[in-house]
Image (spheres, grey):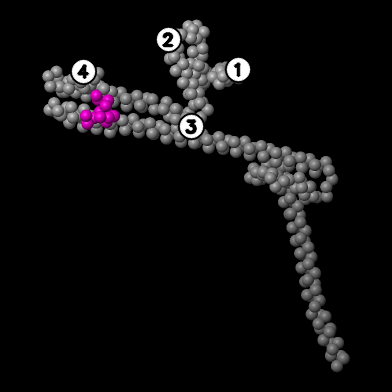
């Protein structure tokens, strides 16, 4: 039952994706992987319908169905990043493998000529090129190389130890490490690119949210300006006060872009004009106060003189 549900879901997903985008669907490599997996899933059902349940190769078709686990790759961005890194290393890794094959070919011929002689040579490990290649692969992976060298030492073969040491140094310590280094370099580059893409997606999401908030603020300010024109308020501060009553402490604000919007600039310039008028009137008031104080200071000595003369006459 679960297998039938899985096949049904995969089939419906395929038809829906093709219906939504029938052209660009085939340009994505992961979509092609889904199609291949879907074909592999239907192979056993087709063989049972055509050849019957006793077809000799039916068990192979059932075993191949384990490849449908690869469908999980399309749902994991981390795994897709690693696969992308592997794809980018194909040409470099191919070059390293070609050089490694050339090295093994040269040493296979040398080993066959030096250690594969019929009389005293090691026919089991160096008797022909195919066996020599397999022996060199064991030496390259450093798997049981001491047993191979011991068999050469028992036959007293000249240059056997120098041959083994040189090949292990070249194959294991240079070429295989070069292979691993290339893989690590491309994997790090793919991980950095994946992190940059994530940061870019987060930035784009933040900018979209910012634009939504800014658009809502502009609509609120425009609505506020229209309300001021349609309704008679005593002052703009009263209008703003009524607007503040509708706000909540959870409402987000984008202050930098809001301060550069045209409605805000219009209101701000009007406020500056009112402040200039108020300052001008205060200056005139200060001038009047200074003039009055000056007149009071001019009258103050005359009053003191008249007061002193009156005291003298009384005496």
Instruction: Write the residue at 50% across / 30% down.
Output: 77
Q: Position of residue 271 (x, y in %)?
A: 74, 50
Q: How far is the residue under mark 3 from the one under mark 4?
A: 45 Å
Give the quadrant of residue 180: top left
Q: Which is in the foreground here, disc 1 or disc 2?
A: 2
Q: Nearer the viewer, mark 1 or mark 4?
A: 4
| Residue designated by label 1 | 19
Mark 1 or mark 3, earlier in chain: 1
Instruction: Look at the numbered discs 1 and 4 and tell me whether their residues touch, using CB distance below 8 Å.
Output: no
In this rendering, position of residue 14 left or right of residue 185? right
| Residue 90 image offset from top left, x and y in percent | 38, 25
Magenta segment's dominant SS is helix
Q: Which mark is residue 128?
A: 4
Q: Secondary structure at mark 3?
A: helix
* Contact between labelled residues 3 and 1, with CB atoms less than 8 Å apart: no
As drawn, which residue projects farthest toward the bottom? 315
The span picked out in magenta is 135-147
On whether residue 257 falls in the magenta region, the answer is: no
Residue 113 in view of the camera: no
**Could you tell me which residue is drawn at 48 percent across and 23 percent down?**
69
Disc 1 from disc 4: Cα separation:
58 Å
Residue closest to the eye, 123 or 132: 123
Mark found first going from the N terminus, 2 or 4 = 2
Of mark 1 and mark 4, the one earlier in the sequence is 1
Against 203, residue 97 (above or below) is above
Q: Which residue is mark 3?
A: 78
User: Whole-Å distance between the Cαs marked 1 and 2?
Assistant: 38 Å
Q: Is 56 above or below relative to 230?
A: above
The N terminus is located in which quarter? top right
Q: Position of residue 36 (x, y in %)?
A: 49, 17
Which residue lies under the disc numbered 2?
56
């Amino acid at each position: 039952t679960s297998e039938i549900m899985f096949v049904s879901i995969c089939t419906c997903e395929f038809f829906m994706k093709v219906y939504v985008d029938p052209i660009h669907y085939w340009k994505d490599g992961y979509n092609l992987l889904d199609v291949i997996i879907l074909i592999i899933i239907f192979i056993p059902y087709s063989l049972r319908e055509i050849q019957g349940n006793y077809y000799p190769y039916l068990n192979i078709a059932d075993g191949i169905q384990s490849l449908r686990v690869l469908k999980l790759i399309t749902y994991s961005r981390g795994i897709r990043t690693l696969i992308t890194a592997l794809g980018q290393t194909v040409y470099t890794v191919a070059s390293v493998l070609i050089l490694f094959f050339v090295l093994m070919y040269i040493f296979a011929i040398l080993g066959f000529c030096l250690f594969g002689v019929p009389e005293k040579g090691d026919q089991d490990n160096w008797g022909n090129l195919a066996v020599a290649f397999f022996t060199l692969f064991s030496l390259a992976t450093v798997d049981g190389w001491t047993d191979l060298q011991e068999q050469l030492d028992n036959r007293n073969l000249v240059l056997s130890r120098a041959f083994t040491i040189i090949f292990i140094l070249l194959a294991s310590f240079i070429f295989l490490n070069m292979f691993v280094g290339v893989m690590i370099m491309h994997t790090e580059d793919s991980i950095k690119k994946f992190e940059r893409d994530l940061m870019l997606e987060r930035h784009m999401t933040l900018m979209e949210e910012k634009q939504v908030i800014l658009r809502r603020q502009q609509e609120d300010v425009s609505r506020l300006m229209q309300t001021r024109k349609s309704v008679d308020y005593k002052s703009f501060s009263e209008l703003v006060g009524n607007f503040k009553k509708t706000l909540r402490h959870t409402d987000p604000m984008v202050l930098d872009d809001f301060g550069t919007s045209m409605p805000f600039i219009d209101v701000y310039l009007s406020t500056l004009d009112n402040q200039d008028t108020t300052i001008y009137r205060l200056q005139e008031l200060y001038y009047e106060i200074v003039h009055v104080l000056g007149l009071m200071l001019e009258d103050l000595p005359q009053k003191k003189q008249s007061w002193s003369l009156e005291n003298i006459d009384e005496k």
